[in-house]
C-alpha cells in the first residue's frame, strides 16, 4: 500500500513560500502535509491523490505554544507530545493536555499535530472537539497574505470539511483566557485504549464569585456530525454549583438531545450512555479545576 | 524523482527516490536494512516499522522518504554498538521478551525512546507506552518485564 504518483514535493521555509507553492495547481491538487498521521493513510488508500505535497515541517513560525495576555497561542504544527507535556496548560486549558496525552499512541503523538488534526477534521477525533469546547479561534493566512480569524464552530463545518480554502494555511489556534476562574477537561471512550473516540466529551466552565457556573461550553466528539456543541448540557450547567445532581441532569439532557447513530461497535443507547457517564466525569473534573482543587 | 540525503545509523545515504516512496521501503529496499519490519499492510497500526527520526520514535510507514531528507534516522540495526547489545536488547534476551520476534524491532525502537523520557516507569506506564505496537504472539507480559528490567539495568549502569 503506497500513495499514487506524486509529481512534486516541496519543503518551504515560510508560510508565504508554502502558499506560493500552490499556484499553478487546481483546487485539491496541491495539499499541505503537517504530521501526516491522517493524510498519509488517506494517500495510501488512494482516497486522496495529490499531485503536489507541500510539507510544512520546516516552517518554524507554525510551531510552539506561547501566551498572550492570558490566552494561549498554539502553532498549527505543534505536535501532540508538546501539548501533552506543556505544564502551563492547566485550569481552563487542561482539556488540551487530557486529549493530547491519549491521541493514538506514542509514535503518533511524536509526529501528529493539532493543526493537522483540526484541518483534517476526522469524524472521530479528539482535538477538534477540544478546540471547539474551549472556544478556540482559528487563525488563517491566504495566498495574498491576508489573515482572518474564524471561530472553531465556523471552521469545523462537518467531518472532513472545514472553512479553510485549499490555498489557505492554518497558522495557529488561539484559546482565549475566559473572565474569572475557569476549568476544562476531556475524556473519550474508544474500542481499545487510546483509540479513536466512539464518544468524547469536552467541558469548559467558568465560575462566578459565588462559585456558581457563569459560562459552560460542552463539545462532543465521535458522533456522525463530527465535533459539535451540546447546548442542552451547557444551558443546564449555567447557574448551578456543579454538584453531582446538576451535572447528571445536564448530561441526561445532552444524551437525550444528541443525534446519535448506532453502528456495530456501539448502538444508540450505548452512545447515549457514554455521553452521560463521560460527561459526568469530565464536568466534575472541569468544575474541580475551575475551583482550583488539586487532582 | 528527487535526490535525498538521509543519515541512517550515522551513515549518510544519498539516493534518488520517487516522491511517493515510503521511508520504510527506502530503509528496507534501498538500503537493505530489513530489521525494520512491516507487520500490518502499511496502515500505521502495528508499530513494527517504528524507527527514530531525529531521536523520536515514529512509524516509518507514515512518512515519505523525501520528508526524511536532511534528517537522522536510527533503525534497530543501529541500537547495538558493534557486538555489544543495548540494555533493552539484553533485557529482551534475558526475559524472553520475544516469541516469533516479528514485532520486536519496532518495540525496541519505541521503548528505547520511551525509557529515555521515562527512565523509571511503572508497569502501567510501560503498557501505555506500548499501545502503538502489536505483538500477535501476545507475549506482552514478557515484553513489559523486559522493559522493566532494562530500566533497572540502565539505572544501575548510570549509578
Image: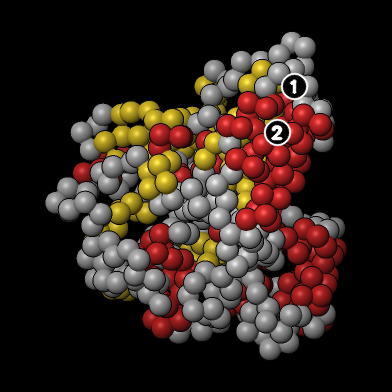
**Discs 1 and 2 share one subunit:** yes
Q: Residue at x 62, y 55 (%)?
A: A268
Q: Nearer the viewer, residue B102 or B16?
A: B102
Sequence-first disc among 1 and 2: 1
Q: Position of residue A172 (x, y in %)?
A: 44, 35
Q: Which mark is residue A240?
A: 1
Question: Are discs 1 and 2 less than 8 Å apart at CB?
Answer: yes
The chain under label 1 reads A
Q: Residue at x 71, y 14 (%)?
A: A208
> Looking at the figure, which quarter contains the N terminus of chain A?
bottom left
Q: Position of residue B157 (x, y in %)?
A: 81, 64
Is the residue A27 above or below the residue A265 in the image? Answer: above
Q: Residue furthest left?
A: A24
Disc 1 from disc 2: Cα separation = 10 Å
> Quick one: SS at disc 2?
helix
Is the residue B124 above or below the residue A126 in the image? Answer: below
Q: Position of residue A292 (x, y in %)?
A: 78, 24
- Few, some or many residues within 10 Å of mark 1 (<14, 14–19, 20+): some
Q: Nearer the viewer, residue B159 or B4?
A: B4
Where, by quadrant of the figure, is residue B104 drawn?
bottom right
Is the residue A259 above or below the residue A138 in the image? Answer: below
- Name the image colouring: secondary structure
Q: Which residue is mark 2?
A: A250
> Quick one: SS at disc 1?
loop
Amino acid at each position: 500500500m503506497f500513495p499514487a504518483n506524486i509529481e512534486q514535493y516541496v519543503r518551504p521555509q515560510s508560510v508565504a513560500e508554502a502558499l506560493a507553492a500552490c499556484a499553478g495547481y487546481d483546487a485539491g491538487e496541491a495539499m499541505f502535509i503537517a504530521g501526516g498521521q491522517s493524510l498519509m493513510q488517506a494517500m495510501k488508500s488512494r482516497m486522496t491523490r495529490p499531485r503536489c505535497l507541500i510539507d510544512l515541517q520546516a516552517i518554524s513560525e507554525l510551531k510552539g505554544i506561547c501566551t498572550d495576555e492570558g490566552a494561549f497561542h498554539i502553532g498549527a504544527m505543534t505536535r501532540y507530545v508538546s501539548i501533552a507535556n506543556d505544564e502551563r496548560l492547566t485550569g481552563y486549558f487542561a482539556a488540551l493536555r487530557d486529549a493530547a496525552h491519549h491521541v493514538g499512541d506514542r509514535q503518533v503523538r511524536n509526529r501528529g499535530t493539532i493543526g493537522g488534526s483540526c484541518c483534517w477534521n476526522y469524524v472521530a477525533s479528539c482535538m477538534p472537539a477540544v478546540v471547539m469546547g474551549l472556544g478556540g479561534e482559528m487563525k488563517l493566512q491566504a495566498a495574498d497574505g491576508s489573515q482572518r480569524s474564524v471561530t472553531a464552530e465556523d471552521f469545523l463545518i462537518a467531518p472532513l470539511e472545514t472553512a479553510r480554502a485549499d490555498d489557505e494555511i492554518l497558522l495557529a489556534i488561539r484559546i482565549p483566557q475566559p473572565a474569572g476562574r475557569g476549568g476544562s477537561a476531556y475524556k473519550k471512550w474508544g474500542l481499545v485504549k487510546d483509540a479513536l473516540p466512539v464518544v468524547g466529551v469536552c467541558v469548559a466552565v467558568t465560575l462566578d464569585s459565588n462559585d456558581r457556573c457563569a459560562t459552560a461550553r460542552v463539545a462532543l466528539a465521535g458522533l456522525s456530525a463530527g465535533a459539535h456543541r451540546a447546548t442542552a448540557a451547557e444551558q443546564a450547567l449555567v447557574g448551578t454549583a456543579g454538584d453531582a445532581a446538576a451535572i447528571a441532569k445536564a448530561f441526561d439532557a445532552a444524551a437525550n438531545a444528541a443525534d446519535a447513530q448506532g453502528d456495530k461497535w456501539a448502538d444508540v443507547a450505548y452512545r447515549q450512555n457514554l455521553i452521560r457517564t463521560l460527561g459526568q466525569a469530565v464536568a466534575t473534573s472541569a468544575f474541580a479545576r475551575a475551583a482550583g482543587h488539586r487532582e | 524523482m528527487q535526490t535525498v540525503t538521509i543519515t541512517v545509523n550515522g551513515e549518510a545515504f544519498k539516493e534518488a527516490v520517487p516522491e511517493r516512496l515510503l521511508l520504510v521501503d527506502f530503509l528496507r529496499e534501498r538500503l537493505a536494512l530489513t530489521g525494520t519490519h512491516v507487520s500490518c499492510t502499511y496502515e500505521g497500526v502495528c508499530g513494527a516499522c517504528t524507527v527514530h527520526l531525529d531521536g523520536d520514535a515514529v512509524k516509518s510507514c507514515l512518512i515519505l522518504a523525501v520528508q526524511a531528507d536532511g534528517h537522522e534516522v536510527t533503525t534497530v540495526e543501529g541500537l547495538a554498538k558493534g557486538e555489544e547489545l543495548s540494555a533493552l536488547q539484553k533485557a529482551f534476551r534475558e526475559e524472553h521478551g520475544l516469541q516469533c520476534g516479528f514485532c520486536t524491532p519496532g518495540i525496541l525502537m519505541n521503548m528505547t525512546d520511551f525509557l529515555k523520557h521515562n527512565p523509571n516507569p511503572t508497569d502501567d506506564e510501560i503498557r501505555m507506552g506500548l499501545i502503538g505496537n502489536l505483538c500477535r504472539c501476545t507475549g506482552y507480559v514478557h515484553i513489559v518485564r523486559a522493559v522493566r528490567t532494562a530500566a533497572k539495568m540502565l539505572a544501575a549502569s548510570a549509578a
